[in-house]
Image: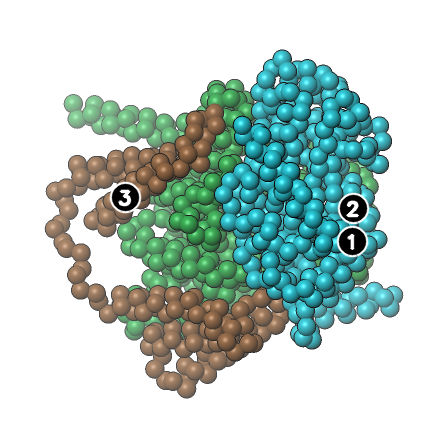
Chain colours: A cyan, B brown, C green
Amino acid sequence: MMKRFFTILFVLSLIMVMPIHAVGFPTKEVQVIIPWAAGGATDLIFRALAATTGKYLGKAVVIVNRPGGGSAVGYTEGAKAKPDGYMLTSGVTPLTILPHQVTTAYTYKDFDPIINVVSDPSMFLIRADAPWKTLKEFLDFAKKNPEMITVGNSGAGGGVHLVALAFEKAAGVKFNHIPFSGGGPSVTAILGGHINAVSVSPPEGISHVQAGKLKILALFAEKRLEMFPNVLTVKEQGIDFAMGMWRGLVTPKGTPPDVIKKLHDAFKQGMDDPVFKKNAMDMAVNLSYLGPEAFGKLMAREDEFFGKLIKEIKK
Amino acid sequence: MNRYEMAGGMVLFLFGAITALLSLRMPIGTFRMAGAGLFPLCLGILLMVLSGIFLLRFLLKKWQSVKKEEFPSEIPGSAMQVLFFMGTMILATFFFKILGYPLVSFLLMVALLRILGMKQWPFNISLSLITAIASYFLFVQWLKIPLPKGWIGL
Amino acid sequence: MFESVQQLASGFTIATTFYNLFYCLIGAIVGTLIGVLPGIGPIAGIALLIPATFGLHPTSAIIMLAGIYYGAMYGGSTTSILLNVPGETASVITCIDGYQMAQKGRAGPALAICAIGSFIAGTIGLFGLVFLAPPLAEAALAFGPPEYFSLMVFGFIVLSNVTGTSLTKSLMMAIVGLIIGTIGLDPVTGDARFTFGSVSFLGGIEFVAVAIGLFGIAEVLTNVEKPLEMLEQRVIVPRLRELYPSLQDLKKSITPILRGTGIGFGVGLVPGPAPVIATYSSYMIERKISKHPEEFGKGAIEGVAGPESANNSASQSAFIPLFVLGIPFAPPTAILLGALLIHGVTPGPLLISQHPELFWGVIASMYIGNFILLILNLPFVPLFANILRIPKKILLPLIILFCITGQYTVNNSVFDIGIMLLFGALGFLMRKWAYEGAPLLLALVLGPRLEVAFRQSLMISHGDFGFFINRPISMVFLLATVLFLVIPLIRMTLKKQRRGEVKQ
């Protein structure tokens, strides 16, 4: 009873007074730019993380969606932000992909790494009532009918689009790639049966797999998922292919090291919070913590890999 | 239809033409794989066609009935007022980040009130001050909107 | 059906606990305030208050945040009516007749009918939500890229002439809106379009800036142009007994409210620009079937009652895809989805079965919240209506300050203020030259989605245009569009023929 009373007092005081806090970072809310529309994987994960991190940071973490241009809009804005730690950007695989494909105003080198949060295998989902029962049937059909199977992705040049392109090469088939403006819209399109398959990365579509509406056709992971132990990886089915997405947080180059440390510590605590852990499990995302240094190395490695891959595809 | 509407039609035709020309610089592609320029190019051409029809109809039907009145060459006092008003707002926008929200809101109020004929300075300044303080508390303190602090650092 | 009633009853027991009622009330009050301020819409409002819900029970938290959402929908029309400043997409249409009513001293009835219409729409919308949610969510899935394209074309052609002046001029303004909508990065290929090398243009032109500019700032400038002596005069001051709608007003409004509710609920299931399509359609229909269409644009109460109801029931049905599919179709519900996650609830197709207390508790609280909002808003009417007693020479600078501040809060962007002023000047000239802003705004919202749907469709069909006609839903919309364009032409030729016969 008393606890509830104090909760109300807390809410009221937040609403009515909103006091100014002491000096030192952070003195105001911290914003995180998500370069995609709300409802996609990155958006969902960082919304959940923002919620638990607010407690440890002392100020709210606010998610700002800046979709468009296959993430170029959001990253351009993120790179140009003041390096004061108040405007962070979610650093996700496309940060090391897009600059190889089009001329962008930024590369991953324009950002300082803070923390890596998630590392997820990608997958293809199809409707549960699709004509293909197995990956082999699917690929056989694709071989006979090049460019007929429509595969949705969350945006041209985005991570899952590239995964689909790379898988196409590994399996020796051709798909018809349809870009959507984010993971939410592409999953909606497969639910409605407007495309044949969709390239996603968890948590997108996972709740629909659980509900039996969609099923995992191809899992591009090194090992099987804990949540779906019966789903084979494509490696187990004879195609040597695994690819995933990592999702972390970056800040514009030149942010003071002590600010980065404060941010890193708060987000690490947010990651370890049981509420976030449960959320992450429900969303079937694979938590994979990396500190600033290791995350920076990962980005450099991935940047080199995608640079080569894109050059090959463009040939 | 009057002369002003026709002037509008001409502006629209020009706007369409510029859009179409600029679109041609972008990749056009095919309908199967549309490039970035295709959609704006179609729009620009469509706007040219529509405004062309609009102007033609005007010329055919209304040519005789239009009086040979000239556009007003002398700007009347009230139009100057609009220009002053607009100019003040543009200045406020320009200095928004530099001077900070509390100061800009105060100065903006003083200037706009003056343009609209508020000649008693004490009343003008106190009204502007009250407005600036009230909006500062509403937006910055209560709603926690990160408005620029600027020069005075509030 | 019976099961739903039973569960709704249990939802009411959850919603009527003291604490949940309290949070519902707080949400409704804060939402109304946020809705009244231009610029700060439900999205910013919910985002601002999410931290305040840490430590609350998930149901209480969502009850409060949902309260902010529909509270803001109630409050959104206030500045449209009083000051001609549309704070969000949904209240653009309310400016047209709402502001005219206020200019004639009838701000009170206009504000009151908004609250009443919203209440009725909200109530009926909730029943739809309770009994029809799962089948409606399935229906929403039937809309793929081609259906979406055809619906957008239909909306674009039919609704662009919403005020019923010249179709050519409306279409021209709509195309200008579409062109402005292409500014920024190409959503499919990622190429920069019309950005002139500037980063500020990359994200495109902000809708709210264009809306406030074309309506609010342009209106202020038009007033400023009048001689100074005229600014000394006050707007017609409302008399007390005219603060609330007369019986005749209510009679006139009731069918528009019901029609608006239906339209809004159906359209609310369309991803994205639902509020715009819903309000424009409602206004268009009311004007078309009215016995006195000439009153529209001069302060017809039907032109306020219909769209406002449509707006509110659309915001109710926007909850359906969120609760049933776990996919937000509009930004405000996307924020609510984030809030659900924060409280350890994963939205998705299993939400209703896994968290029945949350789903039914929130539904019941929405009903109570609507009632609270009605009671809350009606006493505010005289207060708001009295804002117009402020002399214009003081009111106009205040509006400008409000617009500039509100615009900044949308994206924390000074560039957006510049865009707002630019469109203010443009809107001022457009008024002089007798061009309308409403079609431009409609197209600005529909444009990007129309283009993407068009390109996606042709990619799926390998460039085959027959795709649009082969799909039944898509074909119906295209056919309706063609009929809309052709019927007036046939009528005109028939009239001419008849006249010709008479002459002979």
Mark positioned earlier in the residue sequence (1 or 2): 1
Q: Is residue A41 above or below residue C494?
A: below
Q: Residue furthest bottom?
A: B122
Q: Chain of mark 1?
A: A
Residue at left offset 40%, top offset 37%: B26
Q: Which mark is residue B14?
A: 3
Residue closest to the eye, B53 or A27: A27
Helix, strand, or loop for circle 3?
A: helix
Mark 3 crowd level (few <14, some 14–19, many ≥20, 10 Å Cα): some
Can marks 3 and 2 be said to lie on one chain? no
Distance from disc 3 to disc 1, alpha carbons, whole Å, reads: 56 Å
Distance from disc 1 to disc 2, alpha carbons, whole Å, reads: 8 Å
Q: Going by the image, does C22 lie left or right of C149?
A: right
Q: Is residue A44 above or below residue C419?
A: above
Quadrant of the snapshot with the C terminus of chain C:
top left
Residue at left offset 40%, top offset 42%: C179
Q: Is residue C343 above or below residue A243?
A: below
The answer to whether the residues at label 1 and label 2 have Cβ atoms under 8 Å apart is yes
Q: Going by the image, does A256 lie left or right of C208?
A: right
Distance from disc 3 to disc 2, alpha carbons, whole Å, reads: 56 Å
Q: Position of residue A12 (x, y in %)?
A: 72, 69
Quadrant of the snapshot with the N terminus of chain C:
top right
Q: Position of residue C318 (x, y in %)?
A: 63, 43
Mark 2 crowd level (few <14, some 14–19, many ≥20, 10 Å Cα): some
Helix, strand, or loop for circle 2?
A: strand
Helix, strand, or loop for circle 1?
A: helix
Residue closest to the eye, C324 or C237: C324
The residue to which callout 2 is attached is A287
The residue to which callout 1 is attached is A271
Amino acid type of the residue that numbered disc 1 sits on in the rendered structure: Met
Residue at left offset 64%, top offset 56%: A112
